[in-house]
Image (cartoon, rainbow, N blue to C red):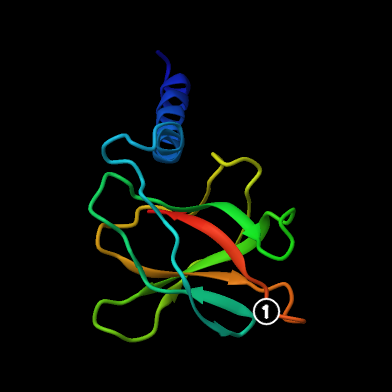
Amino acid sequence: MNRTASIGTVLAVAGAAVLAPVTAAAAHPSTHGACAPARPGNSFYAGGRIASTPVTVPKSGCSTIAVSHIRDTRHPDDNCQTFLLAFLPPQGGDPTYTEPVQACSTSPRHRTVLATDVPDGTVFRVLYQVDYIEPDTQTVRYTVWR
């Protein structure tokens, strides 16, 4: 095999390995080591975003954090939202934030990955951008896979 073909094969295998945890978990939610679902409650509103209660990554073979089943409770046909994560340091202090990601639930099995290579025991909050605050602050329901 020539060098260019070898590099292409390595890249294809590496790309498949990155996508495998999300795809496998979506297809077989009961598989050992698959990402586990959670529905954290809302904790607070600040700066145009709603933050969830803290979520802990369980001991599993899952190394991603993803969202699915996104729905605006007031407008059920709205199934898209902008999400980001706030990773909470174990010793306290300021959280570390991910970049915002537009996520849509095009089907119940579709998941949008918000972070990869997340170690077991990591504590984080899910934040979503609020689109409206009148007459009430927007409430978005979603499932977190970790």
* Local secondary structure at mark 1: loop
| Callout count | 1
Residue closer to the observer: 146 or 6: 146
Q: In this view, does 8 lie above or below 65?
A: above
Q: Quadrant of residue 110?
A: top right
Residue, x 53% and y 46% (percent of image)? 111
User: Residue 106 location in percent, x, y?
Assistant: 66, 43
Residue 78, by quadrant, is bottom right
Seen at 23% across and 53% down, the residue is 59
Q: Position of residue 125 (x, y in %)?
A: 43, 71
Quick one: label 1, few (<14), some, or many (20+) residues within 10 Å? some
* Residue 56 in which image quadrant: bottom left
Q: Can residue 52 be seen in this view?
A: yes
Amino acid bearing label 1: Thr
Q: Which residue is drawn at 25% across and 48% down?
A: 60
Side of 39 where 69 appears, left or right: right
What residue is pinned by disc 1? Answer: 137
Image location (x, y in percent) of residue 26: 46, 37
Quadrant position of the N terminus in the picture: top left
Q: Please report the residue visible at 74 percent of the width from the left and 53 percent of the height from the top.
A: 77
